[in-house]
Image (tube, rainbow, N blue to C red):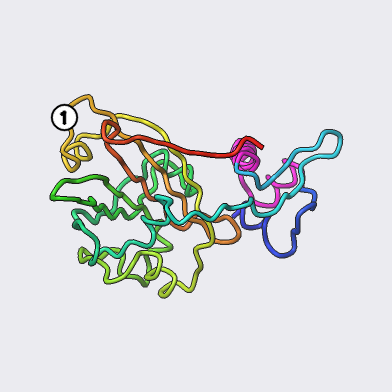
Amino acid sequence: MLHAALYGDEDPPGTRVPSENQLVQAFGMSRPTVVRALELLKRDGWLESRQGYGTIVRGRPEVVEQKDRRGREALERGEARASGRLVEVAEVPVPARVASALGLPKRAKVLMRRFPVEEGGEAVELISSYFPAGLVQDTELASAEALSGSVREHVEARKKVRFDHVTERVSARLPESGEAELLGLPDGVPVLSVLVIACNASGQALQVSDVLLPADRQELEDTYRLN
């Protein structure tokens, strides 16, 4: 993949990125695909454009370790031990927001595992995790049974890969009918969507989880220094 090729050990920070024409020829991709990939890598901090010089590799973006992040919780929650239940395991057309994160075409199929998290018998969040076909092979992700450990533990053990960092994208939207039903939401109540993109050290997305939180039950607060 373009992303992985740019961030191997042979491309340390400061390396100049090939031109768009060179990338098109090297990877056999269309120019719009290459341009879009470069835009995403710049946005996420992997690349930097310098006037009069071109585009360079910045290296892995700085990741702030925080133990209370939704992404960490979604990856490390044990399905069999968590308060909730696995309600759906199915091969589904990849949602547009997930396709972009996984680098898949819009009509691709992915495996989805859907898990409502409950407190006091009430669903407080809904986690829908999506996995590309290549990651599902030789694992139990397609099983309708809850995993004994976390998804991260299972995938790392079976696929010999390592989850390195997570990018979270927060947005608000109206839930789909099935999502609203699982969360017990009346019509018209929006949700906060935390799109959790779990990547390896080279920045390749291994898993995407869409964590939905009823917007009428959330309050976001942050305290930080100004200097």
At horizontal 42% and vertical 39% (from top left) the residue drawn is 97
- Residue type at mark 1 is Pro
Disc 1: which residue: 186
Left or right: 84, with 23 as reference point: left
State the residue in front, 93 or 128. 128
User: Image height check: is 216 above or below 154?
Assistant: above
> How far from the left and from the top, in percent, is residue 4?
62, 57
Left or right: 129, with 104 as reference point: left
Residue 170 sits in which quadrant?
A: top left
Q: Which quarter shows the C terminus?
A: top right
User: Image height check: is 145 above or below 218?
Assistant: below
> How far from the left and from the top, in percent, is residue 169?
46, 40
- Classified by dominant secondary structure, the portion drawn in magenta counts as helix
Residue bounds of the magenta highlight: 18-43
Q: Which quarter shows the N terminus?
A: bottom right
Left or right: 108, with 163 as reference point: left
